[in-house]
Image (spheres, grey):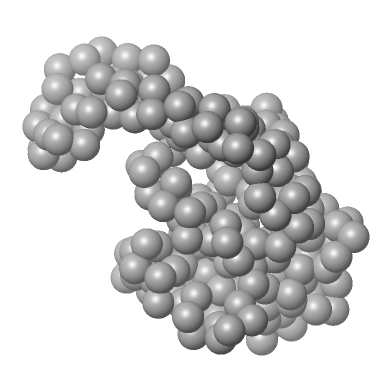
Amino acid sequence: MPTTEIDGQLNATERRLLTEAITECAQKPQVAIEVGTWLGGGSTLHILRALEKNGAGHLWGIEAERSIYDQMLANIRAAAPDAAHRFTPLFGFSQDVIKKWLPEQGPDARVDFAFLDGGNNPREQMDEFRFLDPFIPVGGQILAHDAKARKGRWLVPYLSTLDNWQTTLHDVSYEGLFQAKKIAQQPSAASLKSAKARLFRQQCNPAEIAATVLPANVCLFFLRLMPRCLSRRVAEGRV
């Protein structure tokens, strides 16, 4: 593999955990999807290299910002020419792209591996999970970055409550990396009820209600009135 490196998120431990989730699983992933490629040097590059090491699998990567998307494509071609044939880029917002992408996979569509690292909105991540979950087989995996921040505030407790998912929160960075493996096709009725109740409580958080109903510029105005350290914690969902 070429040693060219490009800008990307995830620290060294997170990149190792991401790689091992693909290379050390019993059933090698054939279909992988990523939400939020950024410049490609973090998750995208390491997923591709892991698939190439397995000798199997293909990654579809979603990015919503055009300038980042274009630079990511150039970066992947430069840094991973041997694995680039395993990559299909998808431009747009995840909810729209996934809803269009899944039917295109045909009647036997399945998703063996998903990495969720899109916008800083817990509702988006829950939507992504709900779209993908019916197509994830037993043994399939979901990993999500920013698990300790606002982005993961709904998905992490929701999946951790469902008894058909085996979950781990890797506390190896300020952001946190969440890993979940599907161990049964459906959750029990009791665990699903508990998960939905837990999600409802999260959705009723005053900060989340404000973020939903207030315009972005109004939220930004109030954040700017706060001390910098406090505004960052509020924006990231840490208070």
Query: Which quadrant of the figure has residue 45?
Result: bottom right
Picture coordinates of residue 122, whole percent (x, y)? 40, 40
Does any portion of residue 70 appear in the rendered image?
no
From the viewer's perspective, is residue 13 above or below residue 94? above
Quarter of the picture holding the N terminus: bottom right
Locate residue 67, reporting x and y percent: 33, 69
Q: Quadrant of residue 220?
A: top left
Tell whether 50 sits left or right of 43: right
86 vs 115: above or below: below
In this image, 183 relative to 127: left or right?
right
Which residue corresponds to the image point at 75% horizontal and 50% vertical from the top-left?
184
Residue at screen point 47% across, 60% down: 131
Between 119 and 203, the one lying in front of the other is 203
Residue 221 appears in the figure: yes
Q: How many marks?
A: 0
Say above or below: 210 vs 17. Answer: above
| Residue 21 or residue 131, whichever sits in front | 131
- The quadrant of the rendering that contains the C terminus is top left
Q: Residue at left 74%, top 39%?
A: 166
